[in-house]
Amino acid sequence: MSFELVVVGGGNMGSALAEGLVRAQWCAPEDLAIVESSLEQRAELTTRLPGVSVLASLELEHVGPATGAVLCVKPNHAEAATRLLAIVGVRRVLSVVAGFPTVRIEAIFPEPTAVIRSMPNTPVLVGKGVSAIAGGSQVTKDDLDWAESILGAVGTVVRVTETNIDVVSGLSGAMPAYLYMVVEALIEAGVHQGLTRDVSRQLVIGTFEGSAALLAQSDKSPEELRSQVTSPGGVTAAGLRVLESRALRAAFLDAVAAAGERSRQLGR
């Protein structure tokens, strides 16, 4: 038996990708396999992904050179998983492993192999992810198109050079956590001013969702949209003045720089 694609790692990212591919009809369920070592997780995946083969390990009779693979394991398991892909003869790999450069993956394979590195973010879980892809030394346009078709099933894809993947990790890769922290803080601010936590949560999350939709649909820049709700000497201006005085912009600049540097360190 052979598969068109094998997803190695059935955690949040791997299972979300598999689910998105099935939903988008990227391939028939029987042409997709997902490899997961956890017995409990395999049972859950079998229920969630009917028709998809859920394997405990990579086996020679299951995959071959015609099979593409998505590497979705933790960084400390990445080299071992890649060695298994090399053993079974996979020649095209999309890696979403943080801090694992293409040159290290390519070096594991005995034959020239197309390796595409990516940095998706957690909104892939709801089909709204944003992913960047970068090709290694053996990658062609067809390989990049293949990788984009996979990640495009769960969101938006941009193409960058690999030198920028660490920046992407520090920006959009980590950005959900930055935004969740902002949401947490605003909910707490509402509670401190006398709202119930439930009301504050509804106000903040609803406004967050609506503002994101408006930003995505509008032809105006973020600066223009911000100015539309900021009357001189008004309520919003008073709040923004405090944020500017606390160096909010500088904090985000430093956060993205620190996260990007940590990604570079992992790659070394």
Image (cartoon, rainbow, N blue to C red):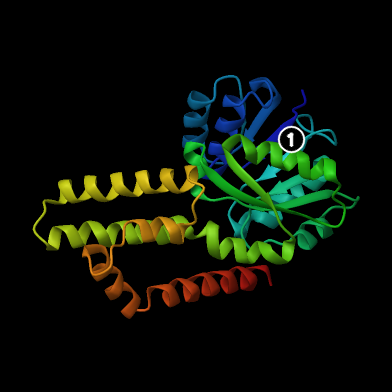
Q: Nearer the viewer, residue 247 or 69?
A: 247
Q: Residue at x 52, y 74 (%)?
A: 258
Residue 90 seen in render: no
Furthest residue toward left: 194
Q: Residue at x 60, y 68 (%)?
A: 263
Does 119 sit above or below residue 93? below
Where disc 1 sits, the SS reads loop
The C terminus: image quadrant: bottom right
Is 97 positioned to the left or the right of 196 in the image? right
Q: Residue at x 21, y 64 (%)?
A: 235
Furthest residue toward front: 232
The N terminus: image quadrant: top right
Is 157 positioned to the left or the right of 121 in the image? right
Does 213 sit above or below residue 192? above
Q: Which residue is mark 1?
A: 59
Q: Position of residue 193 (x, y in %)?
A: 11, 62
Q: Position of residue 101 (x, y in %)?
A: 72, 62
Q: Position of residue 215 (x, y in %)?
A: 45, 49
Report the amino acid beneath label 1: Glu
Q: Nearer the viewer, residue 175 or 68?
A: 175
Q: Residue at x 37, y 78 (%)?
A: 247
